[in-house]
Image (cartoon, rainbow, N blue to C red):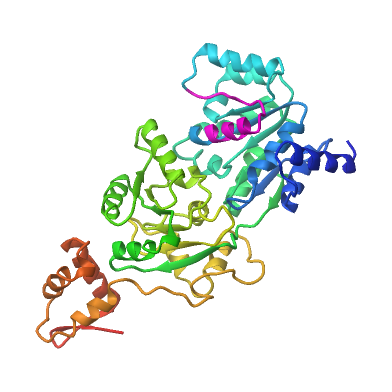
Amino acid sequence: METTDLQETISTVASQVFSINSIRPYQRLIITNILERGKRPNLLAILPTGAGKSLCFMLPAVIARGVTIIIYPLLSLMADQKKRFDRLSIPALVLRGGMDGRDKEEVLSALSQGKARILITNMEMLSQERIVRRLSRLKISLLVIDEAHTVISWGRSFRPVYSLLGQTVAQLNPDRIAAFTATCDEFTASALKEEVLGNDALVIFGGLDRTNIIYHRLEPFFPLLDIIAILTDPSARPALVFCQSRDLVGSLSGRLSSSFRTYAYHAGMEKDERTRIEKAFYSDREAVLVSTSAYGMRGDKCGLRTCIHYTLPQTVSDYLQESGRIGRDGRKAHAYAFLGSGFHPSELDDILLRDGCIRENLVSAMGSGLEGICAGCDVCDGSKLEPQGLAETARALRIPYLRTEADLVRLLAHKRTFRVLSENEIRHGVRKLISSGKIKVRFKRLKFVK
């Protein structure tokens, strides 16, 4: 197909099948590279969340003459993708765990007979020799690896099946491999090339910088007060709050439920319960979802306005992935990173505490650069937040008879602002104020330092 004809075909299919009249430049570049005939390198596309990644492989899957196999790391993502194809009346099949032998055979036979040319699956299925042998008899035009960073990060930890991907690709022998991710540092990109894509793979970079997300950092002393203060404004909801542990998710969602309509979400829940919560949260314009990282890759709710990391993930890529859940409608959204509240030290604490633009520091840590000026962070626009509880604590310390830590904790516990906190939380906050130098002991008396 000539280049001009290919571009016309891409535009026609985008309009007629996907009802899209304008394709972004990097989307067209990716689609063109996938569909051009002849010996061409595989590609790695690094696109920010909400950048229209799915179109980059769904459209080629419609045009390509052979079979397209799409690999996902999570069953929920597979189900979401199947729904996208179903809404567009594009035949697509799913091969996943839990299917009996007859169901698997029906899927493989339908592909062989040309009843469908799109297969959505995972590496657990593609690690089965019988399935790979059947698929290798087909002409596979495109192999898509979505959330490709998990191939490296999971393949070397709790999903060793991903370490077999290179071997599986060799057996399937697709015309082209396209890997997609929203977050990919230099190490992960190099490892993907070496293990799966080939060293000549084309890297198409759509940018890590989500210009509609405004980044904030905060070192809270009484974190629950800060969360309530941020989310009290109705325009800050619907919102996500990320925590590191399932127990903390349950506890925090319960504490917030007196102020907001709140849902708890983590991977330890039964599938039916997670599905119920996803549906309820998806349709709720006022709700707050408190979650572990389980929702960081899963969520596709479009109108999220706020993301609060009560505890930080371990890596910059995970932070960008999780905070990238918000603002997918293109409107302004806010991401808040609570520093120093994790169970274990995070590289993010150091990166976020660096001088200068938060956005630039995050993007630089991923081996990239910021194009143009910062689109918004609390350093560049001067909107740094004051942690909640400081003003009340300072006023309390003006009382002459108040001398000890215990005196201060007892007094704060009776103030309206602090009534949502336990005595232990207040004590922890006071001790953090002392260790940070905000409160000092002078002449055997506590004194607030401005």
Whole-percent x, y for residue 435 in the image: 26, 73
* On screen, residue 79 above or below 348: above
The location of residue 173, given as percent across then percent down, is 71, 27
Query: Which is nearer the eye, 130 or 120?
Result: 120
Q: Position of residue 206 (x, y in %)?
A: 67, 54
The range drawn in magenta is 78-97
Locate the C terminus by quadrant: bottom left
Q: To which quarter of the image does residue 372 belong?
A: bottom right
Quarter of the image for residue 141 reads top right
Q: How many marks?
A: 0
Q: In front: 347, or 86?
A: 86
Magenta stretch contains residue 101: no
Query: In the rendered view, does 446 fall on the left or right side of 193?
Result: left
For the point 67% across and 47% down, the residue is 45
Q: Residue at horizontal 24%, vertical 77%?
A: 392
Q: Is residue 440 left or right of residue 169?
A: left
Point out the residue furthest to the top here.
Answer: 102
Q: What percent of the width, then of the height, locates residue 24?
A: 72, 52
Nearer the observer, 270 or 405: 270
Relative placement, left or right, of 441 versus 217 is: left
For the N terminus, the quadrant is: top right
Identify which residue is drawn at 14% across, 88% down. Answer: 443
Question: With respect to residue 104, does 15 lie above or below?
Answer: below
* On screen, residue 88 above or below 202: above
